[in-house]
Amino acid sequence: MAAARSDPGTPDRHGLADGVRRHGFRKWYERELLAGHAHMVLAVLASVGLVGLMEGFAEASRADKLLTALLFIACAAIGLWALRRYLYLLNHAEAVANQAICSGCDAYGRFDVEHEDRRAAELLVRCRRCGHRWSICE
Ligand SMILES: [Zn+2]
């Protein structure tokens, strides 16, 4: 079955249901933010690489200019991918976090996954405190 996340180019190794079952919602959320910020650091490093390559381009020989141009393209591609991934991870984590509050008792992130509908990208969850059930859309 295909992954239900909205980012089809990325393997679903850390799905919401699996992550919440394994670590709990708060740890899953923390891991998503850490992964997102790691991608942001990669995007910043790629930007630094781009600036360095631009600086060296003017003084390079013809053969080095070709290599510099190839490295520039590689850095730009890595930076754009990392930035896209960073924004996706943060937006996904925030979208799920906004739905993680129990309307029965206002408990935040204290739920168990009862059922996962991958086709609809939806989880049926139950509050650990009051037993209220609701759906979380990914
Ligand atoms: Zn509750």
Image (spheres, rainbow, N blue to C red):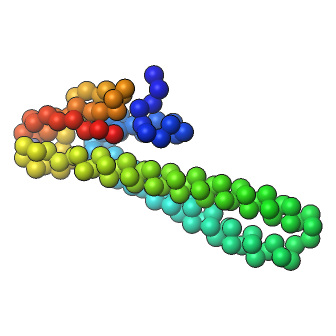
Q: Is residue 125 above or below residue 51?
A: above
Q: Is residue 105 visible?
A: yes
Q: Residue at x 37, y 26 (%)?
A: 119
Where does the image place residue 9, in percent across and percent down from the top left? Answer: 54, 39
Residue closer to the observer: 36 or 72? 72
State left or right for residue 27 relative to residue 53. left
Q: Residue at x 17, y 36 (%)?
A: 134
Q: Residue furthest top?
A: 1
> Quadrant location of residue 79?
bottom right
Q: Quadrant of the C terminus?
A: top left
> Quadrant location of residue 122?
top left
Number of callouts in the render?
0
Q: Residue at x 22, y 46 (%)?
A: 100
Q: Quadrant of the N terminus?
A: top left
Q: Is residue 59 above or below residue 41?
A: below
Where does the image place residue 60, in percent across and percent down from the top left? Answer: 87, 72
State left or right for residue 47 relative to residue 63. left
Where does the image place residue 93, in percent across and percent down from the top left? Answer: 35, 50
Assign ligand 1 to one image quadrant.
Answer: top left
Q: Is residue 94 above or below residue 12?
A: below
Where does the image place residue 28, in percent across and percent down from the top left? Answer: 34, 46
> Quadrant location of residue 63?
bottom right
Q: Is residue 31 visible?
A: no
Q: Residue at x 13, y 49 (%)?
A: 107
